[in-house]
Amino acid sequence: MSIIMDSITDQNQIFDKIAQWSNNAQNIVVFTGAGMSTESGIPDFRSPEGIWSKYNPMKYGTIEAFLSNSKKVWKFFLDLYKMSKDTRPNLGHQVLVKLERMKHKQNPNASFIVVTQNIDRFHQEAGSSNVIELHGNGKEVICLSCKRIYPFDSIDTRSLPPICPHCSGLLKVNAILFGESLPLKAFQLAKQAVRNSDFLLVLGTSLEVYPASSVIFSAQSKKVIVNLTNTAYDHEFDAVIHTRISEALEKVLLAVERLSI
């Protein structure tokens, strides 16, 4: 039976249980979605004030839309990039790094893997050492012809769409659009990590984006989800927590520290 926590009174008991699962785990996987980065000031996609409320995903978020009107979609790319350029990893990202380091100190042979749907690279910037990006990297662009990759900041975007300095091919943000396949290696690594996990922590996702979110359903481990709102899959989890991610992770960290003494 799932433990569901909204504004529950026995928080210590619940977070102690989650900390116990974490402390006992040899292979931890953290799966993160757009809600992981909202506390950094980046809007999510599907909430009433999210990105898709401003931009129709079928007109801006598909590979077909990009290929038919790349100039229009590149304006969308630039808006997203400007929106995120001055943002930084938040407390939630930082606490995950602390949890990873504590786990490795407790057990040098333990595995702590972050699988993310996000393209902001905040996990790496915060210091997470093992990150699998299912949807690519929004701080890079890729040439659709020669496959060379460039930092976003290095590309001249005064004329849209920008072209590859090497072969004059069409450049695209190195992130996965609807209609594109996920990077095969990342997808396989994520599925393997989840299958091998004995503790899975899911943070800030509605679990509605396929096939990325499908990787979590192969987990046979203890599973916890932290999200502001309900998802259609809450019943699949051992604990469901409805609160801000940073708040929940801080409580998990405190409980891990308390049980480690």
Image: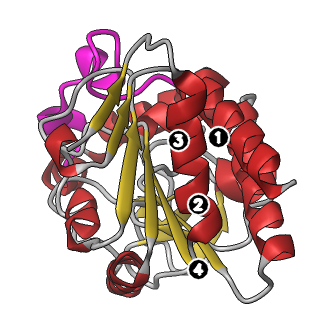
Residue at (38, 42) in percent of width and height: 225
Q: Is residue 176 visible?
A: yes
The N terminus, quarter of image: top left
Secondary structure at numbered mark 3: loop
Mark 1 and 2 residues: CB-CB less than 8 Å, in contact?
Answer: yes
In space, the residues marked 3 and 2 are separated at their CA atoms by 50 Å
Mark 4: few, some, or many residues within 10 Å (few <14, many ≥20)?
A: some
Q: Residues within 10 Å of mark 2 (few under 14, many from 20)?
A: many
Q: Residue at x 87, y 54 (%)?
A: 261
- Residue that label 2 marks: 22
Q: Amino acid at mark 1?
A: Val
Q: Label 1 to label 2, Cα distance in Å?
A: 9 Å
* Residue toward you, 169 or 14: 14
Kindly identify the residue that appears in the image at 52 percent across and 41 percent down: 159
Of labels 4 and 3, the one closer to you: 4
Q: Label 1: few (<14), some or many (≥20) within 10 Å?
A: many
Name the secondary structure under disc 2.
helix
Q: Is residue 41 above or below residue 77?
A: above
In primary-sequence order, the first of circles 3 and 1 is 3
The secondary structure type at the circle numbered 1 is helix
Which residue position holds label 1?
A: 252
Query: Which portion, as a residue range, is magenta?
Result: 42-62
Question: What is the number of the mark on residue 26?
Answer: 4
Q: Residue at x 40, y 66 (%)?
A: 134
Q: CA distance from mark 2 to mark 4?
A: 8 Å
Residue 65 drawn in magenta: no
- From the image, state whether disc 3 or disc 1 is nearer to you: 1
The reply to whether discs 2 and 4 touch (Cβ–Cβ < 8 Å) is no
Decide which of tag 3 and tag 2 comes sooner along the chain: 2
**Amino acid type, mark 3:** Ser
Magenta stretch encompasses residue 52? yes
